[in-house]
Amino acid sequence: MLAFPFERRKRMDGIHLFGEWYDCPVDIPEFNHADALRKLCLESVEAAGLTTVGEFFYQFEPHGVTGTVVLAESHLAMHTWPETGFVTIDVYVCNFSTDNTDKAQKLYNLIEAVFRPGKTHFQKILRGSKESGPGGPASPITSEHTFSEMMQPDWGYFLRPTKMHEDFHSGLQRVQVYHTDTFGAMFRLDGHTMTSEKDEFFYHENLVHTPAATHESPRRALIIGGGDGGTAEELLKHPSIEHITMVEIDQAVVDVARRYLESIHKGSLDDPRLTLKIEDGFAFIKNSTETYDLIVLDLTDPGGPSTLLYTPEFYKACADRLGEHGIMTLHIGSPLIHQTQIYNTIERLRQAFRRVSPYLTTIPLYGGQWAMAFCSQQADPHQLSPEIIDARLKERGINDLQFYNGATHAASLALPNYVRKMVPQETTSG
């Protein structure tokens, strides 16, 4: 689906509310019963003063409900994951003939009160308006399409694109591509910024070269996710790499990367050493018999299509696909706002790997400091000095990195005290 030109979108006056609700009590009927969720949604629409013109709700087996209410004003859409206590909600209303902003917020609040999330991620976009943010008075940002990236309900940052290239739903997730003067082309999924042309190296170089430079001679690699091609591009800088398998669940991600993110993947998506598979990563790893030197989990945050990729079962399946000297890396969240998630993820990883070493970097589009995890049965990134890392990069002819070097390798593994407190000590040292 091609997006309308940005100039035409200026006339689409309305409010768009997105919510991700975590740690909801799963015993409420609305979580796993289509009829109960339908009743809640229709009654909430009426109580908010909006108008239902159609609806459809579907019961998945064994878990989950998805549903949409078509409004005279636009729509309400929801999806539940009872197995993880996770819910998504999407409310959009137009404001052409009357201001429906308060009604949309009331609808959102009524449903949220029933699901009682322990943690929320909320985003509000005012379409065709000069205001954007989580609520309150008008923002001083005078943009026709400013939006917020919310880190917490009371904290986030704004982004002001100059052009929208794409905005559509792939059938699995919402896909958006913008252009901004600061970050260049910028790619988002389900309302969350994934990567951009000008800051992608903070993420991809640390995710890839920390394990690849630690390994003496990586030859075969597996990427789960990574449809933008940035991880593959970094792996292919190591001359020993003979083959990469990349398993991406959504063809639309690869398509928009080819169209708009060439400066990130640099042709790696079509490199003969890469085999692209469009399928579910969990199913692939469970059915695979291949072994790899490196596995890189380049995933969205937990929730939606990636939910099962943060489970002990998945981590153990990955460990089975690595040799004794194989290494796996993944991002595990922000130490400032995801303390419980980081602790739980490391505990799950330790069920599959003897060595789990968290390390840190800074990712501007993710709001600041971010944590990753290095996982192996034998390899230990702490044992390689800055001089050894720099020597390996030189031997391999890797001289075009913007972030990673021997000094940053060592520095990333030095955890601040506040991070040490949320990580069992045995996972922070060699």
Image (cartoon, rainbow, N blue to C red):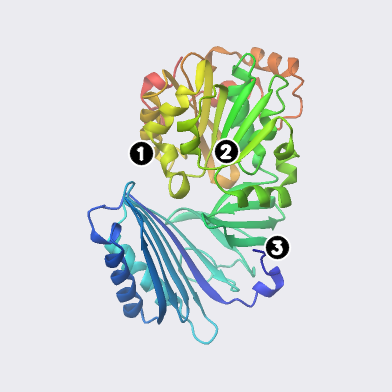
Please report the residue visible at 66 percent of the width from the left and 66 percent of the height from the top: 3
Left or right of residue 289: residue 263: right
Which numbered tag is attached to residue 394?
A: none
| Residue 147 to residue 152: above or below | below
Where does residue 110 sit, x and y in percent of width and height?
Answer: 32, 69
The quarter of the rendered structure image containing the N terminus is: bottom right
Find disc 3 in the rendering and name its residue.
163
| Residue 163 to residue 52: above or below | above
The reply to whether residue 201 is visible in this rendering is no
Which numbered tag is attached to residue 340?
A: 1
Q: Secondary structure at mark 1?
A: helix
Instruction: Measure how far apart labels 2 and 3 are at the Cα level.
Output: 30 Å
Q: Which tag, 2 or 1, sits closer to the chain's start?
A: 2
- Amino acid type indicated by mark 3: Lys
Q: Which tag, 1 or 3, sits closer to the chain's start?
A: 3
Residue nearest the viewer, comparing 399 with 354 = 354
Dividing the picture into quadrants, the one containing residue 199 is top right
Where does residue 186 sit, x and y in percent of width and height?
Answer: 65, 52
Q: Secondary structure at mark 2?
A: strand
Where does residue 338 sit, x and y in percent of width and height?
Answer: 41, 41
Please report the residue visible at 46 percent of the width from the left and 16 percent of the height from the top: 377
Mark 3 is surrounded, within 10 Å at the Cα level, by few (under 14), some (14 to 19) or many (20 or more) other residues, namely some
Dividing the picture into quadrants, the one containing residue 248 is top right
Find disc 2 in the rendering and name its residue.
247
The reply to whether residue 182 is visible in this rendering is yes
- Amino acid type indicated by mark 2: Val
Left or right of residue 62: residue 272: right
Tell which tag, 2 or 1, sits nearer the viewer.
2
Please report the residue visible at 69 percent of the width from the left and 68 percent of the height from the top: 6
